[in-house]
Amino acid sequence: MTTNFVIEGLKASIEGKEILKGINLEMKGGEIHAIMGPNGTGKSTLASALMGHPKYEVTAGSVLLDNEEVLEMAVDERARAGLFLGMQYPSEISGVTNSDFLRSAINARREEGSEISLIRFIRQMEAKMKDLDMNPEFLHRYLNEGFSGGEKKRNEILQMMMLDPKIVILDEIDSGLDIDALKIVANGVNAMRSEDRGFLIITHYQRLLDYIKPDFVHVMMQGRIVKSGGPELAHRLEAEGYDWVKEELGIEDETVGQ
Amino acid sequence: MTTQTILPVNTESLKEISLQNNEPAWLTELRLEALELAGQLELPRLEKTRLDRWNTQSYGAYQATNVIDSLENLPMSVQGLVKDENLEGSLIVQHNSGVVYTHLSSELAKQGVIFMDLHTAATEHGDLVKSYLHKAIEKGENAITALHAALWNGGVFLYVPKNVEVTLPLQAIFLTDKETATFAPHILIIADTNSSVTYVDNYVSGEIEGNVVHNGSVEVFVKAGAKVRYATVHQFGNEVTDLSYRRAVVENDGAIEWIVGEMNDGNAMSDTSSILKGNGSSTDAKVIAVGSGAQKLNYTTRAQHFGKNTPSQMITRAVLREQSTAIINGITKIEHGASKADGQQTEKVLMLSPKARGDANPILLIDEDDVTAGHAASVGQVNPEQVYYLMSRGISRTEAEALIIYGFLAPVVSQIPLEGLRTQLQALVERKLGR
Ligand SMILES: Nc1ncnc2c1ncn2[C@@H]1O[C@H](COP(=O)(O)OP(=O)(O)OP(=O)(O)O)[C@@H](O)[C@H]1O
Ligand SMILES: [Mg+2]
């Protein structure tokens, strides 16, 4: 059975302020969806609400991953069910090495007694780090501590590769990456493309989509998906900006506002 | 706030005990003077800690102990603490009021190292003991140091001769399991010129019906060019009030390194300080602490710089659970004339419960212009953003919090140069965290 991810009527607020005002989106394994949209329109909020960030209160809707209600799961259960979020601003955690962290994450998916062996883990990790052109020294660095913006993003992709999720959400994975790194990260994502894995890629720039070709492009404004189309939509946004969308839909202020 | 110290012993019986133990006259005299002082002095005033509300009275009485001939006759709890590498090595065990086991490796004995209980040393090496005992921590400082000087028992005397480098750590274990017995070990270490030594000790309690005060003192004299590493782990149960003073006096180019694990379950006060007397002398203190239950804790590290070119480094990290309270003080004092001194300190407290209370007080007192000094302090809860990040990778909340807590302690624990001690501390941290 191929992966099936359905978001229906998702509403979420933060500190009493409603930000997501009813999101509908359906994704299948093998598909790549891109979400674009001006600043402050709710893209990161959507990603956080899907992952279960404690600050966001979901007030309505449902999110089904292979017919299982994601919204009823704790954050760690969502991850183990196959959800992965590459964050716009990954946390730094002092004292916890990258390798200890990732090994815990892998073992959390395994039965007690069948934990991954250290040798195997190191080998896998080193191979993926090589693919991402990361210095093996990063294994022993504290998690994201003192990482540059681009290093943090690569580290998010490394985690994605090690954890083998079903639905991958990448929030501005391209921000802070230089051109070479952008290609490396895109190659990493493309290598992970498969029939049973879906991607939701939040980005501001067509450039990323030159490397990772989306099947669908959605535009978010005012906490909703206001327009959807194919890859040509992203090209037009890149060329013309968002004014024509706003005009077409009669939107004056595209942000979530009050 | 004058609280009259109730003396646990009168002059007559203190004299009697001293005579029975065949102590030299100077020592009997010293104890009696100290007892008199104890009646006049007050408890030390600690930052935000009311010591007068703690149980500081349960001293019991001196009780003679019988020497054992084999480690197998030690309580199981103590046997587990004997480091493997030490079976052939050097070990002293104190059980309640007296030392019951002493072993010094023949190799060290040949090199002239002295390692014995302080009672015996006071007779056999009277001149040496007399000229150092209570010279770092003076009996007249407060009621606790005075009572200690009057009552101390058992203890350790370690002397390392000039140029002798001891590679294997020497170990001592202090066990209290009888509420009626005074428990006040005194550790006196003298590392002579250009010598080096590592000494590790453990403080434990067995089953106690009642309360015990541990009033302990550690004095370390680091001579020119000598290096002393002193590691100590306190893991008393909640029946024990732990009052511990540790102080090192460091001469030219000498170095003291403190590694302290505060893993008690009862109220605890400790004061670990280094007096950098000589030029080029240095100190490095690492303290990790975990508080739980209703524990009240007050931990101080100090560095006092007199010598020129003296670096000091002090780090304390404390994790607090449940309703525990900890006051963490760091005091760097640079005296006039201690040019090119460098004093650095960090105190960090991580609170795991809304009822835990932590306080970090970094203090720099500087009377010299040509110095560098710095401090950092923080008190905070586990960061929910970090927990979320870890959980978003499939790690459970409990495991995520554990990673963050161990990560918090890691920068100190990972620097502990003795592997056995590091493992022991990790296990104790886990136990204290209720895992
Ligand atoms: N913690 C918060 N407290 C208050 N308002 C918030 C919080 N998080 C998000 N918001 C508000 O929600 C709105 C949507 O924010 P969100 O981060 O989802 O935007 P975005 O579309 O990802 O923007 P960008 O492209 O700049 O990343 C913004 O107006 C933002 O200020
Ligand atoms: Mg965003």
Image (cartoon, grey):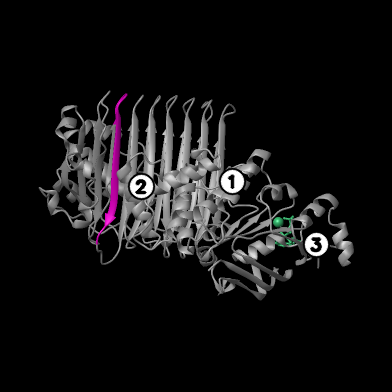
Between A41 and B348, the one lying in front of the other is A41
Compared to residue B122, the image places residue B320 above or below, namely below
Q: Quadrant of the C terminus of chain B?
A: bottom left
Residue B139 % position (x, y): 35, 43
**Amino acid bearing label 2:** Thr
Which chain does the numbered disc 3 sit on?
A
Between A112 and B358, the one lying in front of the other is A112
Q: Which residue lies furthest to the left in this view?
A: B69
The answer as to whether callout 2 falls within 8 Å of ligand 1 is: no
Task: State the predominant SS element of the stretch in magenta.
Answer: strand
Between A30 and B35, the one lying in front of the other is A30
Q: To which residue does mark 3 refer?
A: A255
Q: In this view, does B376 lie to the left or right of A182?
A: left
Quadrant observed for ligand 2 in the rendered image: bottom right
Which chain does the numbered disc 1 sit on?
A
Q: Residues within 10 Å of mark 1 (few under 14, many from 20)?
A: many
Q: To which residue does mark 1 refer?
A: A154
Please check whether the numbered discs 1 and 3 fall on a single chain.
yes
Q: What is the quadrant of residue B164 in the picture?
A: top left
Label 1 to label 3: alpha-carbon separation: 29 Å
Label 2 to label 3: alpha-carbon separation: 68 Å
Provide the secondary structure element on which disc 1 rests.
helix
Q: To which residue does mark 2 refer?
A: B145
Q: Can residue B287 be seen in this view?
A: no
Question: Which residues fall within the magenta stretch?
Answer: B191-206
The answer as to whether callout 3 falls within 8 Å of ligand 1 is: yes
Provide the secondary structure element on which disc 3 rests.
loop
Residue B130 % position (x, y): 26, 34
Residue B265 % position (x, y): 36, 60
